[in-house]
Image (spheres, rainbow, N blue to C red):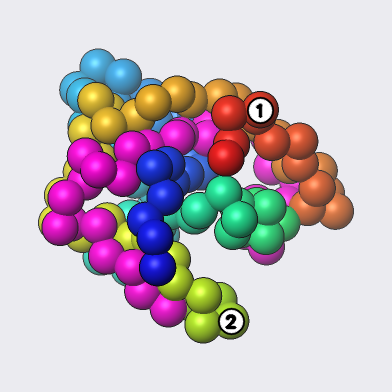
């Protein structure tokens, strides 16, 4: 498997707000519960939004450089056996974030992704 340049983290604006000051993002409650930070590739993003964020507004999509995550980034099977990127061992440094954009997901799970998703 070829590692993509970017992976994506979906969060709420309120969960991400402290990271703007501290430079470290500690993730969403599900990340703390599972012991790692969940990410999606560009190909996985629409289905993740549909399954887990339908009907939600006030979301922030973070595009993160994989090469800055080092060996803390682990690819593990999840939905349908597809390999998903997971960050272990600490917060996400905001310096690894290439861009961030506000998004909303319709009740049916549809969403218009930012042009930068690749």
Q: Is residue 10 above or below residue 3?
A: above
Residue ranking furthest to the bottom: 81
Query: Residue sitting at 65 percent across and 29 percent down?
Result: 114
Which quadrant would residue 93 be assigned to in this image? top left
| SS assignment at label 2 | helix
Residue at 17% in and 56% down: 72
Q: Looking at the picture, does residue 55 appear above or below residue 75? A: above
What residue do we see at 68% from left, 52% from top?
Answer: 46
Image coordinates for residue 27, horizontal then vertical, percent: 34, 45
- Displayed quadrant of residue 30: bottom left
State the image coordinates of residue 1 (x, y, percent, origin top left): 40, 68
> Which of 106/111 is in front?
111
Q: Is residue 68 magenta?
A: yes
Badge 2 or badge 1: first in the primary sequence: 2
| Cα gap from disc 2 to disc 1, whole angstroms | 27 Å
Whole-percent x, y for residue 111 in the image: 76, 41
Which is closer to the viewer, label 2 or label 1?
A: 1
Residue drawn at 37 percent across, 37 percent down: 64
The residue labelled by disc 1 is 115
Q: Which residues are magenta?
A: 51-77
Q: Judge whether residue 118 can be spotted in this image.
A: yes
């Amino acid at each position: 498997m070829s590692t993509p340049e970017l992976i994506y983290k979906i969060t709420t604006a309120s969960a991400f707000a402290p990271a703007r000051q501290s430079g470290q993002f500690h993730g969403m409650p599900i990340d703390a519960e599972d012991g790692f930070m969940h990410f999606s590739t560009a190909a996985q993003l629409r289905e993740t939004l549909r399954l887990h964020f339908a009907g939600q507004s006030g979301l922030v999509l973070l595009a993160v450089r994989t090469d800055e995550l080092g060996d803390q980034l682990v690819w593990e099977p999840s939905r349908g056996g597809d390999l998903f990127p997971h960050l272990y061992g600490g917060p996400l440094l905001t310096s690894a974030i290439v861009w961030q954009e506000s998004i909303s997901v319709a009740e049916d799970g549809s969403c218009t992704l930012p042009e930068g998703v690749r």
